[in-house]
Amino acid sequence: MAEDADALRVRTLFLSDIHLGTKGCQAELLLDFLREVDADEIYLVGDIVDGWKLRSGWYWPQAHNDVVQKLLRKVRKGSRLVYVPGNHDEFLRDFLDMHFGGIEIQDQVLHEAADGKRYLVIHGDQFDLVVRHARWLALLGDGAYTAALFVNTHLNWVRRRLGLTYWSLSAWAKLKVKNAVNFIGRFEEFLIAEARRAEADGVICGHIHHAASRMVGDVHYLNTG
């Protein structure tokens, strides 16, 4: 099924928080990754398309279209693709349990790993009290984050010219904002509790742009970052 003879073949691939439709999206880097990796199953764990930003102004360069086409090509070649919407692509929640061109839309799903363990796959915004109960504050934070992405792009251009490695100002800023606001809602604790409620061995989520993989008691908490 591999698109390229030397592509790395994996069982399952989890992607989240790509934010296609924003200037800070790292579409070219994602394309490089997708050219090198094939998967039997692909889970898009929310905020793949940034509907919030697209409503305020259309931005969709060719690289963003290429990401979509690359994913659809993998589906045509046999990959199973499950789209779990987040808050920025919440418009897709109007189509839950439906299939479009081989793409399944699910609010959450249980994934069985190769070792038989079950993982709850969910974006996680359902347990973010800021998004659920103070949408205006979430939108304000989104605007500040967009500004950080703009600064981040130019900062890393300078770093490349100086021979320095990539550093994500945007991820740092997002984490600081989330620590001050969203973590008040104990985001991770809620996700772990939800995994236990679903009788899952772990949870795979996104939303807070902070990668993590650790055991919390008997639950494996994974955030795609």
Image (spheres, helix red, strand yellow):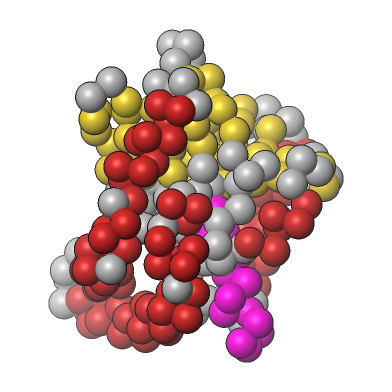
Residue at (36, 43) in percent of width and height: 190
Q: Looking at this view, is 81 or 75 the one in front?
A: 81
From the viewer's perspective, tell me whether residue 97 is left or right of residue 169: right
Residue 209 drawn at (x, y percent):
35, 58
Q: Quadrant of the N terminus?
A: top right
Q: Position of residue 145 (x, y in %)?
A: 37, 78
Q: Position of residue 144 (x, y in %)?
A: 36, 83
For the question of whether residue 40 can be seen, the reply is: yes
119 with respect to 215 (left or right): right
Task: Please tell me which residue lies in front, 82 or 221.
Answer: 221
Magenta segment:
46-58
Which residue is more in the foreground, 67 or 183?
183
Identify whether 180 is placed above or below 136. Answer: above
In the picture provided, is 29 more to the left or to the right than 83? left
Q: Is residue 49 magenta?
A: yes
- Residue 9 can be seen, yes or no: no
Name the quadrant containing residue 73: top right
Is residue 153 shown in magenta? no
Q: What residue sits 56% from the left and 28% below the top?
A: 110
From the top left corner, tell me how far across and down residue 24 is, in percent: 44, 75
Q: Residue at x 59, y 33 (%)?
A: 109
Task: Give the quadrant of residue 87.
Answer: bottom right
